[in-house]
Amino acid sequence: MERIRELLNTSYAHKRGYTGKGITVAVMDTGLFLHKDLRGRVKGFYDVLGNETECYDDNGHGTHVAGIIGADGCASRGQYMGMAPGCGILPIRWMLEHKDEYNIRILNISVGMLKNAREEEQVELIKLVEEVWDAGIVVVAAAGNNGPAGNSVTIPGICRTIITVGSSDDDNRQAQGQGLRRGYSGRGPTDSCVIKPEILAPGTKITSCDVHNDGYTTKSGTSMATPVVSGAIALLLSKYP
C-alpha cells in the first residue's frame, strides 16, 4: 500500500484532512477479521451463510480488500495504510435498509460471477446492483481476472450503470508469480457492446490486512484494484459530500 499511496499521491488529500471520515464503504465479500487497523470503524456485520453475529473471515479476501480501502496502518506504523484511513467499513449485504443510518455512500464488490452461472442468478445479481446504484450508492466492481481476451468481464462488472475496475499493472511479470497470466484484467466490450472497464488502478502485489495476528499479506488481481478506486471515491466524498 505504501507504493500505491505514492503512485496516487493520497498524501495530498490526507494532509488536508480528507481521510474518508464520515463516509461508510460497504464491502460485499468473504467477511471481515477485526484487524487492529480497522477496529473502531466497523459499523456492523451480517452473515448470510452461517448467521454469525461477530465479525469473521474464513477466507481472508474480504479483510484484505477492506484494508486497501480503509486501514489506518497502526499495526505497521503507517506502511500499509489504506486509501481512506478515516472511513467506516460495513461488511454486510443489507445496505439499502441501513443506507442513511450509516451514511453508506459506496459499495465495493471485489468478487465476480462467471458467464456459466445460472442465467437467473446473473439477472438477479445485476438487478440488485442496479437498485443499489439507483438508491444513490456508488457501486464499484472488479472486472475479474479472466483477460486478456475481449468480453471477459465478470458479473456484475458487465453492468452498464456501475464503475468497473481493471488492473493497471496486469502486464507486470510479478503477476505470474501470483498465479495470474500477464494481462489478466477482464476487458470488454460486453455482449451488450458496453465498453468496460471504465477505469484502471494498481492491483498487482498489494500488501494489506491479513486475518492472522493483525498481520499483513500480499495479493494480486482486479479484486485489489477495485478497493483502491473505492477508497479514492471516499476521499473525494470527504471533500464534496
Image (cartoon, rainbow, N blue to C red):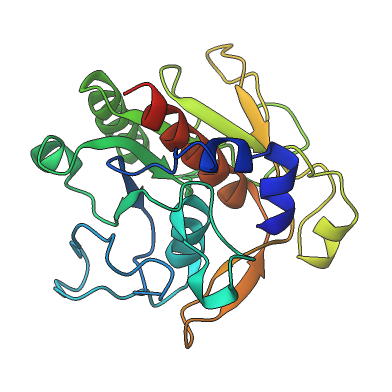
**Left or right: where does residue 221 sit relative to residue 162?**
right
User: Foreground residue, 34 or 135?
Assistant: 34
In the rendered view of the protein, which quadrant contains the N terminus? bottom right
The count of marks equals: 0
In this view, the residue farthest toward the top is 193
Q: Residue drawn 62% across and 43% down?
A: 11
Is residue 203 visible to the viewer in this orientation of the structure?
Answer: no
**Left or right: where does residue 139 sit relative to residue 7?**
left
In the rendered view of the protein, which quadrant contains the C terminus? top left
Q: Quadrant of residue 34?
A: bottom left
Q: Where is residue 67 in the image (x, y as percent from the top left)?
A: 49, 61
In this view, the residue farthest toward the front is 16
Q: Residue drawn 37% across and 74% down?
A: 33
User: Foreground residue, 13 or 41?
Assistant: 13
**Left or right: where does residue 43 sit relative to residue 207?**
left
Q: Position of residue 86 (x, y in %)?
A: 38, 51
Q: Residue drawn 45% across and 28% down?
A: 236
Q: Residue drawn 19% across and 73% down?
A: 50
Q: Where is residue 98 in the image (x, y as percent from the top left)?
A: 11, 42
Q: Is residue 31 above or below residue 157?
A: below
Is residue 149 visible to the viewer in this orientation of the structure?
Answer: yes
Q: In this view, does 17 lie above or below 172?
A: above
